[in-house]
Amino acid sequence: MGHVNAAEEPGLGNRGDAADDGPIGGAAAHDGSAQDTTAESAVEGAGAVRGRLDRRRATAGVAVIVVVAIAAGWALFSQRKAFIAGVRVMGYLPLLVSLPVAIVAVFATFLSWNEVLLGLDVRLGFRSAAKVFFVSQLGKYLPGSVWPVALQMQAGYERGAKRRTMLAANLITLVLNCTVGLIIGGLSLSVAQPKVLGHYWWFGFALLILLPLLHPRALPKLIDLLYGLIGKEPLGESVRPASMLRSMGWCALCWFALGIHLAILCAAFGPLSAADIAGCLAAMALAVTLGVLFIPAPAGAGIRDVTLGVVLGSVLANGGQILAVVVASRLVLVVTDLLLALIAAVVPSGAKPTASGSVSQAPGQPTDG
């Protein structure tokens, strides 16, 4: 017999369709449809939950930014009388000239922090990292220096990075900045005021503690030890040596820029010698380092200003000039933080967070770092 084509044999061509329409086939189709509907409902429900969480996080984020912006604004408002008095003494020009130099200093701090993140294999993207850093920096105007760290940990987590890695990056940057600052400050002070260098003996003591932590594995191992003591998963990472060196280079640029910023303000009262400029560099390194380490004060307020005034005693002629420079410096740095945070907040990051800790670009957008 020849081969029979089911499609051509009467009564056979539609058996498959009939089976599909029969009780068993119809039930299977119904079950599949029900499963699809259930899956779609589950996806929609998960999406709704994520949407609500995103809205709550966005609301909380806006609230935090408003609070820290108000705190930074209050730092300006609370010192308005002293600021006005200082401006009357030195004029507006030194403040305007010192502002771009202060921006360079703060931006160099961001580059140092971002370099440490890259050394820990965290790639947020340049603009996204700038937004995290500069907006979180406003948290230092709240009592307690831990707010920038907390804000960076949460912002990094929302962009795919681990909180403990963000904490490690902040601590490593802090150690690098303080160590480089103390080295530059000590060398500068030996030029500006060699006779009083002995009064700052704690420079050497602090360096003895900080220098061993410059090893790429030292601070991450210390963090792992602390995590182990509280029963948390260890970091298990170390910073690449090249990233550490680049980060230290940006730290050095930050300190030199801060010293020049202060020298510009001091120059409003007369020409400065090389020793005076070295004194300005030493003053900023010593004062800012102490301000960073003095956690209870917002942005090191009080301890930073007092230390700055003491070291500037060899550069300026009287207390009135010192007060004018100290207040003007603080106000310029507050304005710098506000400007950079505002620019970072309004410029789109152009990136989407990923679970791996890196950031992938949105379709059609160029890489930003």
Image (cartoon, rainbow, N blue to C red):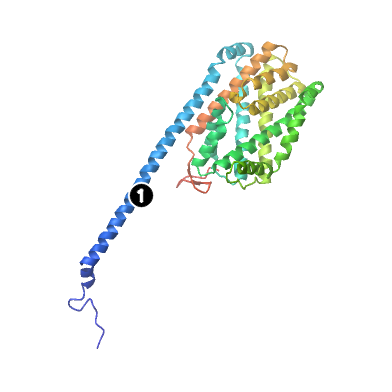
Residue 130 visible in this rendered orientation of the protein: no
The one of 314 and 158 positioned closer to us in this rendering: 158
Q: Quadrant of residue 261?
A: top right
The kind of residue on which mark 1 rests is Val
Q: Residue 234 location, x and y as percent? A: 60, 46
> Residue pushed farthest right?
195
Q: Residue 181 location, x and y as percent? A: 70, 31
Q: In which quarter of the image is residue 113?
A: top right
Placement of the N terminus among the 4 image quadrants: bottom left
Identify the residue shown where x is 53% and y is 40%: 156
Residue underneath mark 1 = 43
Identify the residue shown where x is 20% and y is 79%: 9
Answer left or right for 307 relative to 37. right
Answer left or right for 188 relative to 366. right
Tell me: residue 92, above or below residue 241: above
The one of 343 and 232 positioned closer to us in this rendering: 232
- Label 1 secondary element: helix
